[in-house]
Amino acid sequence: MENSPSAPPHAPAPEGRRGRVLVVDDDPTVAEVVVGYLHRAGYAVERAGDGPAALERFAAARPDLVVLDLMLPAMDGFEVCRRMRAHGPVPVIMLTARGDEEDRILGLETGADDYVTKPFSPRELVLRVESVLRRAGAGTPAAEEARPLSGAGLRLDPAARSASRDGAGLALTLREFDLLAFLLRHPGRAFGREELMREVWGWDFGDLSTVTVHIRRLRGKVEQDPARPRLIRTVWGVGYRLDLPGDGEAGEAGETAGAAGAPESPEAPESPESPEATRAIEASESPEAPGTTDHTAGAPRA
């Protein structure tokens, strides 16, 4: 469906307000609700009804964040996200139909910073936008948070938002960078997924598979063998821990205690080729975090 006069860009908010958001959805009802809530929250908002129109708007004026529906005509949301990201980092929140778990995981693996399932609460979406933009904010980090981080050949410069391993640059998304920086600041300490979601994402609720997928993607970029990770370790019944040379002896002893006959590498089921294994890991580590119940927009399409 071509972008038509029935879906014009919303009038921009005045300069100096909270940022520019591009909303991409071919459902005019959902788009109108999302645009209205974001505009009232102080954002300048534009609309596009399909992928090509979204890319035109994106090229004409780079937004601070994109709210992107996956089920678009002409070009799906995955391809739109890939093409936008080819021009540089931009925070993306994807809208997905309830129950499409593989789509949600693929969206995160494509580089989306967050996703919201339909039907959704517009107020929750505004909170997610605020959270993602806060993490992507241009403000200068505090002195402690700005200091370079290093270990096991990894080097991160939070002020420059640059990362490398053994001197080779790492292409990390916004959340991957923040997650690795957090783990490098706390080597040897195990964190549950709820704690990582709160500390890295700034959320007190949400789908914990978000953390699982980002851990898996991060392992794919920093581990020598992502199927048998030696840096970002799974601590069964707890969550994840970053082991650096010289600080992992106690942790490894704790992993093996009481685990006679257990596989040497429990992380292997999280290989990127197995969404079913991802679901099994999610179930084994902790229950799903409660979500909101005020679902008022965007019922799934058949």
Image: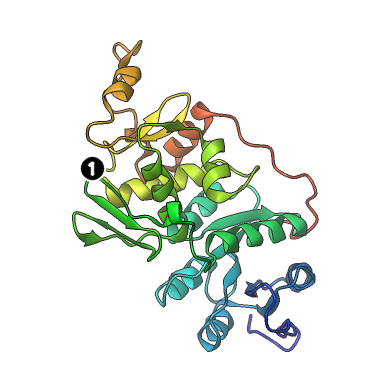
Q: Give coordinates of residue 115: x percent, y percent.
A: 59, 56
Residue 252, above or below 11: above
**Of residues 233 and 288, which is closer to you in this image?**
233
Q: Nearer the viewer, residue 233 or 153?
A: 153
Which quadrant would residue 50 be assigned to in this image? Answer: bottom right
Whether residue 188 is situated above or below residue 171 in the rendered picture:
above
- What x and y, as percent, mark residue 99? 62, 47
In this picture, is 72 found above or below 218?
below
Q: Quadrant of residue 204?
A: top right
Q: Secondary structure at mark 1?
A: loop
Mark 1 burial class by Cα count in 10 Å: few <14, some 14-19, many 20+:
few
**Coordinates of residue 136 in the picture (x, y in percent):** 52, 64
Left or right of 62: which side holds 227? Answer: left
Tell me residue 280's x, y (percent): 47, 32
Return the residue nearer the eye: 263 or 135: 135
> Hey, which residue is sitting farthest front in the picture?
143
- The quadrant of the picture occupied by the C terminus is bottom right
Q: Is residue 174 something one can see in this rendering?
A: yes
Going 52% across and 74% down the picture, which residue do you hit? 75
Is 40 above or below relative to 124? below
Q: Could you tell me the amino acid type at mark 1?
A: Asp
Q: Which residue is mark 1?
A: 225
Is residue 300 among what the camera can see? no
- Classify the position of the N terminus by image quarter: bottom right
Horizontal relation, residue 33 to residue 134: left or right: right
